[in-house]
Amino acid sequence: MSRRAAAWLAWSLVALSVALLLGGIALALVTRSTAPDLPLGETDDGSVVADLVTLLTFSVVGAIIASRHPRNAIGWLFCGVGVTIGLNSFVGDYADFWLASGFGTRSLGETAAWLSSWLWSLFVYFPTSFLLLLFPDGRLPSPRWWPVAWGVALGTAGGMVGNALAAGPLVDFPQIANPYGVDSPIVGVLGVAGSIVAAGSMVASAVSLIVRLRRAGREQRQQIKWLAYGGVVVVGTIFVGGLVLLWSVPVSIVIMSVALLGLPVFTGIAILRYRLYDIDIIINRTLVYGSLSVMLALVYFGGVTATQVLLQTLSGQHRLPQLAVVISTLAIAALFDPLRHRIQSFIDRRFYRGKYDARKTLEEFSAKLRDETDLDGLNTDLVTVVRETMQPEHVSLWLRPNTASKDHRQ
């Protein structure tokens, strides 16, 4: 496929995804006007906004990748995710519309509700597993990984079939019995077995990325670092969202939803724009300032809590004075710079040993340069420093003869 044809197809899929979502929104508006008191599945404002943002992120990133690299399957995978999100939203909104108005045939409305009840299971394993397995060039690391790819596909299919054929009321529409349900224990076994196979294949896909990293050249290594960095950011943000869940459920859902969008964003950067940014510097700064923020937060809240407990013990006063907050803030300001230097030094020694040793070598040479008077010894030290810091294949030093002094002596 040429780039032009690939771009046309990719952006057509984006348009189809948006059209499906807009069609669902139109149905949702009609449903609200017809039956405002009906409990709705996919038509509330939060679901519409989340679907729109997720769809656009996956679809647009996928279309950009597919347009520039038509042979990279990851771009088409993201476009497919966008179409699936749009279809899932549309059939869910149509099912709500059918329940509210009764417009259309019963079989069509029940089928739409049935599709909406199991399409979500496609997102659990399929995109993430294939992203790990195919990243960054859209191909398997070697033909030996084909069984893992088949495991992802068959496991996901088994889980979807188990959800689609489960007898009883539908998950999102409990007032509707599954029109295609099969009352058989085989369906449940198939769903459980498919989930186990898909989960195992996801673990194997992550292992394939580690294997690829060990064999990769400099370019692929930088791309994999970008994906790994994005994965850590996504997981960390989801963890924060889980903590926020204790205070506010809506805010927690928003944080987790935004975190999941990091998957296509970091993937797009890793494939298309990784050369613009030095990922090693970004990782270094994240480790330093992330650790620094956690430590300063512990110092602040620990100082405030300790002061409050001390005041309650000594005076019985439960109200925290402003002086305690001021003292904790001043302590943070005083600790910021020395603590940052200590964390930076520890991270450099632990994770960036080569650069740390090079910097130390240059510092020692600079200190020695101020007091060195022996030119031959200085030449030897300079060659040693260049060899240790830059590690070239060959080092030689040439000194220009001092012709001016010779002319003066003559």
Image (spheres, rainbow, N blue to C red):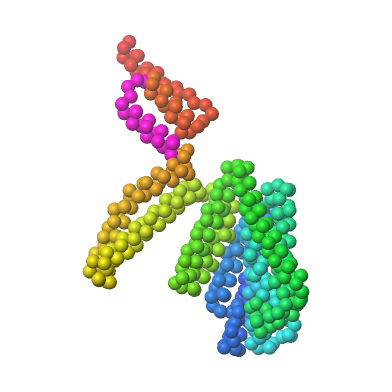
Who's the residue at 67% across and 75% down the image? 117
- Main SS of residues in magenta: helix
Who's the residue at 37% across and 59% down the image? 297
Is 237 left, or right, of 54 in this rendering?
Answer: left
In the image, residue 382 sits, relative to residue 13, either above or below, namely above
Point out the image quarter for the N terminus.
bottom right
Who's the residue at 27% across and 64% down the image? 310
Is 286 left, or right, of 206 in this rendering?
Answer: left
Residue with the most extreme front position = 313
Q: Is residue 374 magenta?
A: yes
> Is residue 209 shown to the viewer in this render?
yes
In the image, residue 264 sits, relative to residue 374, either above or below, namely below
Residue 337 position, x and y percent, is 33, 50
Residue with the most extreme top position = 410
> Is residue 74 shown to the viewer in this render?
no
Point out the image quarter for the C terminus.
top left
Tell me which corner region of the image, top left, top right, bottom left or bottom right, holds residue 102.
Answer: bottom right
Residue 20 position, x and y percent, is 65, 73
Nearer to the camera, 27 or 263 = 263
Nearer to the camera, 86 or 311 = 311
Nearer to the camera, 186 or 383 = 186
Q: Is residue 61 magenta?
A: no
Is 19 left, or right, of 326 in this rendering?
Answer: right
Residue 104 position, x and y percent, is 72, 85
Who's the residue at 64% across and 87% down the image? 100
Nearer to the camera, 34 or 168 = 168
Task: Write the start and end of the magenta stretch as one range.
Answer: 356-375
Residue 405 position, x and y percent, is 33, 16
